[in-house]
Amino acid sequence: MENIKLREKIGYGLGDAASSMFWKLFTMYLLFFYTDVVGLSAAAVGTMFLVTRVWDTLLDPFIGVLGDRTETKWGKFRPYLLWVAIPFGICGILTFSSFGGTDTAKMIYAYVTYTLMMMVYSLINVPYASLLGVMSASPQTRTELSSYRMTFAFGGSILVLALVEPLTDFFSRMEMNSGKPSILFGWQMAACFFALIAVVMFFLTFSWTKERIRPIVEKKGSLKNDIRDLCTNRPWWILLGASVMVLVFNSVRDGAAVFFFKYNVSGASDWSFSIFSGTFTLITVYLVLGQAFNIIGILCVPALTRLLGKKNTFFYAMVGATVLSVLFYFLPEGFVSGILVMQALISFCAGIVSPLMWSMYADIADYSEWKTGRRATGLIFSSSSMSQKLGWTIGGSMSGWLLFYFGFEANAVQTESSLNGILLMMSLLPACATLISVLFISRYPLTEKRMCEISADLESKRKED
């Protein structure tokens, strides 16, 4: 087993902390930013999410192929962390900005900047995800690295969710617009703050990690063969389906949460308090609590996988998320303590699944190499990013369209239909996605025993080369 030191584990985790800060900003606040801050319609934003994310989702496998064929003194995947970190930060700032006086101009700007952001996100995140497959050959070490990754990812999310509203409020009051704080300026400056932190984190990931695993043979397969191998990889298809549904679950719940507390929860404003000139609200408490229990779930993963195996741990976590999401629908209106408890339990289940997906994709890369004699780590790991984007595309687009369907109007008193629709987006609709994920993962064939056999065979072949 490779000797992975603590600094390298931390370095690997920092990469996803950087990505997750903006991922969480997008999933939790971007729809709200476009509707309630910029003033665009929910339906138009939902369509924009679909158009831009479908293109970006299709881009991911090509970036994976590019990574597989990259050869530098730093390795195949690490260089992208160095090259793309600064463009990532710049595009993040531009996404949370808006220019133009008309709705058409604002919409065009949103399309352009969001498309650029998603392309740059893929350029850095696909190689980062692929890095796991070449840092260690041990399935258990990969699970440990995935746990570090997701712990830091949710740590980055907590940082964002704890600070975004206070920072936005603080910066908004630095620039007045007709005697009122400039909310748009506040969002832009908050994005600058998080972009600077993300760039530094990516540089540290590049500096502190190492690529160790080399293919059995150095001969390169053709792109046609790599894609054919992927398309006939049954475990990949199963995990892709399960992963997409997990992301739909997260995206719909996350996309509805800000609206839920603004419009559905009576007396939510009574929970607000100020610290250092920044205002903390109930939604901040709710979101930070969720991320904290995500981390607790992640920390339980190594023990759970040793006891149950990856497949069964994934299965039971999603069953739990399904049941709890259904129960959320029946909580009494305004039952804040019950909402927070349910958020903690659902987030615990969701946190368990997060590192498992990445570790299982690394196993699938080994399975593909064992089956075909060719290693396509970047292409296979790009599918994990693709599943994220596809789930996010479906969930994000559905969020905008569902709000429009239920009659939502920004910054107005909501109808009974709209309020019930937002509640459905927090409960029964996400439960449908997790139930489908359960059905997929129940068919996953790569058990711990099978992966031990595959890993031993690959190690033997590598020693022969």
Image: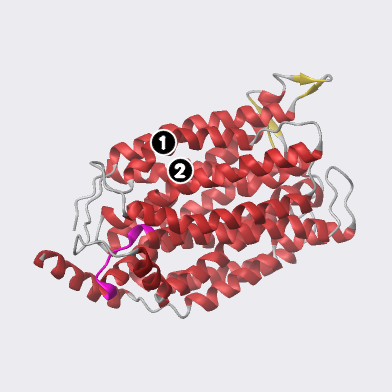
Task: Judge the density around disc 1: few (<14), some (14-19), many (≥20) Cα neighbours within 10 Å.
Answer: many
Give the quadrant of residue 421.
Answer: bottom right
Q: In this view, does 461 lie to the left or right of 393?
A: left
Q: Name the residue under label 1.
A: 201
Is residue 372 found inside the magenta-colored segment of the image? yes
Element type at mark 1? helix
Residue drawn at x 83%, y 60% as measured from the top left: 406
Query: Element at badge 2?
Result: helix
Q: Which mark identifies residue 17?
A: 2
Residue 112, percent across and down?
64, 41
Q: What colouring style does the render use?
A: secondary structure
Q: Which residue is drawn at the image coordinates 54% and 69% (left, top)?
A: 318
Q: Which amino acid does label 2 sit on?
A: Ala
Residue drawn at x 67%, y 25% as measured from the top left = 170
Q: What residue type is labelled 1?
A: Met
The answer to whether residue 272 is seen in the rendering is yes
Most foreground residue, 92 or 449: 92
* Foreground pick, 433 / 83: 83
Q: Which mark is residue 64?
A: none
Q: Marks 2 and 1, how far apart in space? A: 8 Å
Span colored in magenta: 371-378
Q: Position of residue 389 (x, y in %)?
A: 55, 57
Q: Quick one: label 2, few (<14), some, or many (20+) residues within 10 Å?
A: many
* Nearer-N-terminus badge (2/1): 2
User: Considering the image in quadrants, where does the C terminus appear?
Assistant: bottom left
Q: Is residue 39 a member of the stretch shown in magenta?
A: no
Residue 309 seen: no
Find residue 464 and report its horizontal and vertical position in percent: 9, 67
Q: Can you give x and y, in whole percent of width and height, for residue 103 in the image?
A: 80, 39
Pointers 2 and 1 in contact (C-beta within 8 Å): yes
Q: In which quarter of the image is the N terminus?
A: bottom left
